[in-house]
Amino acid sequence: MLHKIAAYLGTLIGGITFTGSIAAFIKLAGIKFTYHLPFKEYLNKPLTAANIAGLAAIMASDSTTLGSLVLLNATITSFALGWNITNSIGAADMPVAITVLNSYSGWALCA
């Protein structure tokens, strides 16, 4: 069970950190690239719920196929969460966002 939790949380937190860091770099570098996810105002709660359901599914099953699919889902949803959360932050608050993303990378490493 501990390995399942560690794999899931490492995937989830690492994905948020990865795409969040890319979005922060793009903003701070002054690159004129803006891409907003469709329905960005409504995405965070369903993506979070999908990740909680995925953690429950991986804990309840011993199937390696299901586990792999759940981790793939966690990767995709965490990429979307990282981009959506960080891209919504203004450039003036980006140092705080980078500090949080650095903390997330530490948590992913611990997992």
Image: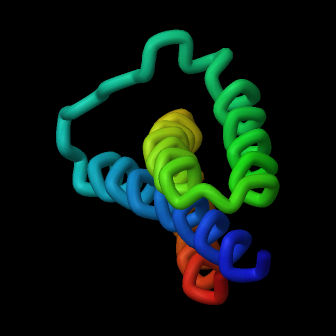
Q: Give the residue furthest to the top.
A: 39
Q: Nearer the viewer, residue 76 or 66?
A: 66
Instruction: Determine the residue positioned at 37% across, 48% down.
Output: 23
Kindly tell me whether residue 48 is visible in this rendering.
yes
Where is residue 88, by image quadrant? Answer: top right
Question: Which x, y percent locates residue 82?
Answer: 51, 47
Q: Quadrant of the C terminus?
A: bottom right
Question: Which x, y percent locates residue 74?
Answer: 55, 48
| Color scheme of the displayed model | rainbow
Question: Which x, y percent locates residue 42?
Answer: 67, 16
Residue 28, compared with residue 32, is above or below; it is below
Direction from residue 33 to residue 84 in the image, left or right:
right
Q: Give the residue furthest to the front.
A: 63
Residue 99, compared with residue 45, is above or below; it is below
Kindly tell me whether residue 83 is visible in this rendering.
no
Q: Quadrant of the N terminus?
A: bottom right
Where is residue 48, by image quadrant? Answer: top right
Instruction: Determine the residue positioned at 64% across, 17% down.
Output: 41
Question: Which x, y percent locates residue 69?
Answer: 49, 46
Instruction: Determine the residue positioned at 22% across, 33% down.
Output: 33
Q: Nearer the viewer, residue 104 or 59?
A: 59
Number of numbered labels in the structure image: 0
Direction from residue 45 to residue 16 in the image, left or right:
left
Residue 111, compared with residue 34, is above or below; it is below
Instruction: Determine the residue positioned at 28% across, 49% down.
Output: 26
